[in-house]
Image (cartoon, rainbow, N blue to C red):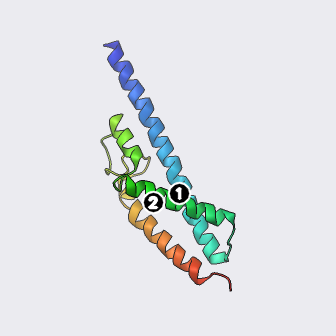
Amino acid sequence: MRMHGGAAMTNRHKLLIVKSVHTAVFVFMVACIVYLWYAALTRTYDWKLWAALGAIVLEGLVWWFAGRRCPLTALARRYGDDTGHEWFADMFLPAWAALKIVPVSSALVVLGLIVLLVNRPG
């Protein structure tokens, strides 16, 4: 009986780690989108812009090739998280916000890229 409780604690601990990592990645990606907009509006074309764009592209490729799901979601489900939307069950976000991540962030990236191109120097 005690081992069963210990295993459940281990899964909860692993789930906490998965949720924490995914939430940290989410915050980093939001920062990349914010920097994209900052660079577009201030005409700042520096290494930080290219790093942010690279991170955005890499995140998009990982998401796309994982069947339009974050690979961390499968881990979260394996460790017992069956709540939330299937894409974002593994984050510390309310369900209403999680459901809007892909459409809102995609629109912000596309619009930011358009502004970046329109405002490019020379």
Task: Look at 63% across and 81% down and name the residue there.
Answer: 120
**Residue 90 visible, this orientation:** no
Task: Residue under label 1, please give it.
Answer: 29
Q: SS class of the residue under badge 2?
A: helix
Whichever of labels 2 and 1 marks the residue nearer the N terminus, that label is: 1
Q: Within 10 angstroms of label 2, few (less than 14), some, or many (20 or more) residues?
A: some
Q: Which mark is residue 60?
A: 2
Q: Which mark is residue 57?
A: none
Task: Look at 50% across and 43% down and name the residue there.
Answer: 21
Name the outermost residue toward the bottom: 122
Badge 2 amino acid: Gly
- Distance from disc 2 to disc 1, alpha carbons, whole Å, reads 11 Å
Image quarter of residue 99: bottom left
Q: Which one is closest to the eye, mark 2 or mark 1?
A: 2
Q: Within 10 angstroms of label 1, few (less than 14), some, or many (20 or more) residues?
A: some
Q: Nearer the viewer, residue 91 or 44?
A: 44
Q: Quadrant of the N terminus?
A: top left
Q: Quadrant of the C terminus?
A: bottom right
**Residue 92 visible, this orientation:** yes
Task: Look at 40% across and 46% down and name the residue there.
Answer: 71
Instruction: Answer with left or right where residue 45 lies relative to residue 78.
Output: right
Q: SS class of the residue under badge 1?
A: helix
Measuring from the top left, give residue 26's x and y in whole percent. 50, 53
Image quarter of residue 98: bottom left
Measuring from the top left, give residue 43's x and y in whole percent. 67, 77
Task: Look at 41% across and 60% down and name the residue there.
Answer: 101
Measuring from the top left, give residue 38's x and y in whole percent. 62, 70
Q: Nearer the viewer, residue 34 or 114?
A: 114
Q: Is residue 15 above or below residue 55?
A: above
Measuring from the top left, give residue 70's x and y in whole percent. 40, 50
